[in-house]
Amino acid sequence: MLAFDHFYGQDLDALEAAGRGDWEVFRIPYQRIYRLARRHFPEAAFVDVRASAAPVYRDNWASYRAAVAEHVRWFVAAYRPEVFVLPSDTIFYFRPYVESFGAAGLSTVVVQKETTISPMTMDIDSQHVAEAVPFMADLMTVCSERHRQFWLRQGVDPDLVVVTGQPRFDVYARPAPPRPVHNLPRLLYFSYDDFAYLPYDGVSTPLGDWTELRRETETVLAEFASASTWQVVAKMHPQQVSLRNWLGPDVVHAATDSDTRDLIRSADVVVGFQTTALFEAALTGTPVIYPAWGPVFERAHELLVPFETYGDLVVHVHGADDLRNRLVDPDATRLAPGDGAKAAAAEHLGPVDGQASDRVLKVLGGYARAASEASPRWRRVSRAVLLGGFAPMLDLAASALKRLGQGRLAASAARRSAHWRQEGSEANTILRTRR
């Protein structure tokens, strides 16, 4: 399979492991696709699912589709894939690839990466998706029946949306490793964007934002980290835009790409707001504190996942002092989620029985077939070979930038080097198969 990796590595890892060598998984970092799209569309086209559909972008679409068709010929020649896998076909710059791979004889299966569906997502976002980026792949697998209903509301053929469970959650069906022993009890905090989970047009939201809730929550967590009552580990969302925080110097920041599942299983308590990780914590028996209060929460709560109503899933705290009182005694927080919590998790996450990856692979096997032959342009092949040769020098530049404290530039250079190296490898494969 050839897959576009858009914050999708855990699911692809699970599928590759379940394939036991019978499946090759070729991963294309989404940044390569995004970079191509940015050559053809202005930044305004990326604001939300509807923006790119504006009539003003008609010429942009024509030039981008032509570039994608050439890109698909390249991928087919380099990898000889038998099925094309996406985490979603609602990402507008992925959609022409579905068309071009289809023209090459390949099916597209969306192995949906999203899981939890809030009331707002179900009622409002489903309409926007149906209008702007309707389902176009050959089939979609989803984690749960609730998630399936999101697509059926849009008029998608029920036979094209299959509930399989989520591959990355198979790990929760296996025996959990012993929790590590820490010098201090460990609190895992999931941060979030100030406009997350709210109606948002890319600029503002009519309901306000979460800045004050996040500030009050993080100020309390910083106090306990500073007092060495808890070891506080903060996990930012990989797509988080709101980078300002109030966590202070004593909070440990997990790497952006760290595995959420490992972090949850090594925590003594989880603190989070409107994140699927709260359901994941329930699967592991990890206690959850749910800080949710204030005027924005009161205005928006009917649009949100009602975590506070799911019995013993979470301990709902109603203000900074309430959160502070809960954290004073670490032993008092250890109220593990029970059967009600696990039932709520099953509603949103679907079956967690360790077999989701096998079910997805069975679906993919039914759609696998050889693509038609493709022959990329010689100039592009030679250019990719050349850039692949320069990748080690770009790695050295990235290391130098990191030592100079230019972390963002270093990360950008490292990503570009990885892309050059991957394209160079692809070009060499194409040359070998041509001979």
Image (cartoon, rainbow, N blue to C red):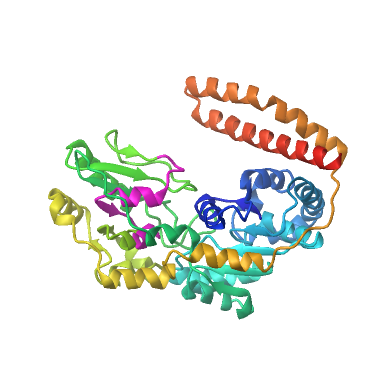
Q: Quadrant of the N terminus?
A: bottom right
In the foreground, 258 or 354: 354
Q: Quadrant of the C terminus?
A: top right
How many numbered dots are placed on residues in this image?
0
Q: x%, y% of residue 283?
A: 33, 62
Task: Say which quarter of the image contains residue 133.
Answer: bottom right
Q: x%, y% of residue 24?
A: 64, 51
In the foreground, 274 or 420: 420
Please name the residue shown 53% across and 64% down the image. 358
- In reply to whether residue 263 is colored magenta, the answer given is yes
- In reply to whether residue 23 is colored magenta, the answer given is no
Please name the residue shown 70% across and 63% down the image. 368
In the foreground, 36 or 110: 110
- Looking at the image, residue 340 sits to the left or right of residue 416; the answer is left
Tell me if residue 165 comes above or below residue 76 in the rendering.
below
User: Which range of residues does the magenta coloring cover?
Assistant: 255-280
Tell me if residue 41 comes above or below residue 106 in the rendering.
above
Among all residues in the image, which is located at the extreme front? 21
Task: Say which quarter of the image contains residue 309.
Answer: bottom left
Tell me if residue 404 comes above or below residue 109 in the rendering.
above
Q: x%, y% of residue 434?
A: 86, 41
Answer yes or no: is residue 406 visible. yes
Answer yes or no: is residue 135 visible. no
In the foreground, 178 or 398: 178
Please name the residue shown 60% across and 80% down the image. 158
Q: x%, y% of residue 125?
A: 54, 68
